[in-house]
Amino acid sequence: MRRRLILTLLLSAVTANAQWQLDHETSAKVNRALDAGINGGDKLKCTVRPIDPFLDFSFRFDSGYVAACPVKEFGGKPDTLIAYTRIMPENGAPVILANAYRFPGIPASMADRVDLSKLANNFEMSGGFVLGEGQFKVDVLMVDNRNRFYRTHWTVKARRNRQEKGAPLTLAPNTVSSYPLYSWEGEPKKIARPGWRLTILLDAAPMMPRSDKLRAWDRAFLLDALTSLLRQTPAESVRLIAFNLDQQREIFRQDHFDRAGFTKLSNALSRLELGTVSYKALGRKAGWAEMLAQLVNEQITQPSSSDSVIFLGPAGNINAKLPQSMLNPCGTGAPQFFYLEYFPRWRLGREFSDAIHSAVQACNGQVLKIHSPGEFAEAIRKLNEHLAVSNAPSNSSGATTWTRESLRTN
């Protein structure tokens, strides 16, 4: 337990800077290093796993990598690693991106209690980029401040599948771009019902249910989907709460969500790549249920409760049902609950309802299962149709689940 706690403290201090595109002079140096090979310096014993391109909710192809470096490789001393990624289209100009990762040293007070030679754990980090259709060669060069390096390369193909042929791509073929700086205008879409209040509960979970880290493409999905929802869902004001059930903690909250808050949310999600869980959370096996019940009950009982509450995020890895006894009655006057539950295409056939699904059902809410950007757009349309209906009584038959078939356009 002591070793686990020490490692958690180490990992919690790893931070990743925002991605940036290199200027012409630095790009030329990196190009020469990649083309001519690297002389001198020791090799880092890291590994890189490529991520195949997939269509995102802004109709671009997301791709990237996950890198892992052994903790003992850094000897308990502070280090900074720069990852340079060159993406070369088959017919187009190359683009070079950079990410910085800072690794902390072991505090002097803990150095005598850590035997790094016996640690098999890794520091992990991710890098991402977006593509138009085409074939691309990817080179990654990782260099630390001790003049050590790691280099690898691979080829990826970005292609729409049969179900995606009608998607209007937003990047031209053979085009490369860094992840954009996410932004939102800061004003919800207005409707003819003044005072309509909306709460969005953002489930900051990874798309891969067994992953314990929020990767670059996970953040891209969450922020893309949130932007689309904010721009298209009518409200007078928006409360935004981001949370993570696995870590059993609230990540971000703002009652009157605005453009500045969007930037703060993006930064908070970036810090979630750490994949750490506090030792207190490890000792509370039912902590996820307590947190989820608290989030739901707050929306029901607080004096300034919203008119509508929307859970948004990928289906989670907690499939247990939230006990009904933990929830306050969702009677007359309670807000309308919805869940936009995303299942990536690789999870087709394994669509098990998660804990949020059961919580929304307990409040006679609407569950909208989505699998693609097209279905997400259709789900928002159906959601807006429901919100446009004047104060109708709750469906006496209970919750409704809108499936893939019901969301498919005719």
Image (cartoon, grey):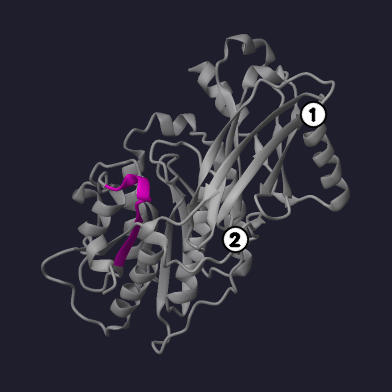
Q: Tell me the quarter of the picture where residue 146 sits.
A: top right
Q: What residue type is labelled 2?
A: Pro
Please say whether residue 157 is visible from this viewpoint: yes
Of mark 2 and mark 1, the one earlier in the sequence is 1
Question: Residue 118's x, y, as percent?
Answer: 58, 10
Q: Which amino acid does label 1 sit on?
A: Gly
Q: Tell me the quarter of the picture where residue 92 sits.
A: bottom right
Say whether marks 2 and 1 touch (CB < 8 Å).
Answer: no
Q: Under tag 1, what secondary structure? A: loop
Instruction: Give the side of residue 85 with respect to residue 316, left or right.
Output: right
Mark number, residue 392: none
Q: How many labels does the image show?
A: 2
Q: Which residue is drawn at 69% across and 49% down?
A: 18
| Front residue (pair 185, 349) | 349
Assess disc 2: are there few (<14), some (14-19) or many (≥20) residues with their C-alpha within 10 Å of its C-alpha. some
Mark number, residue 37: 1
Q: Is residue 15 magenta?
A: no
Marks 2 and 1, how far apart in space? Answer: 29 Å
Question: Residue 373's x, y, as percent?
Answer: 42, 63
Q: Residue at x 39, y 36 (%)?
A: 210
Instruction: Give the side of residue 138 with respect to residue 120, left or right.
Output: right
Region of the chain picked out in magenta, as a range: 337-348
Quarter of the rendering occupied by the C terminus: bottom left
Q: Which residue is drawn at 28% across and 47% down?
A: 354
Q: Which residue is drawn at 72% across and 47% down?
A: 97
**Pointer 2: what residue?**
173
Instruction: Give the side of residue 110 with respect to residue 269, left or right.
Output: right
The relative height of residue 141 versus residue 267 in the rendered view (above or below) is above
Question: Residue 309's x, y, as percent?
Answer: 36, 66
Assess disc 1: are there few (<14), some (14-19) or many (≥20) residues with their C-alpha within 10 Å of its C-alpha. few
Instruction: Give the side of residue 160 with respect to residue 106, left or right.
Output: left
| Front residue (pair 330, 402) | 402
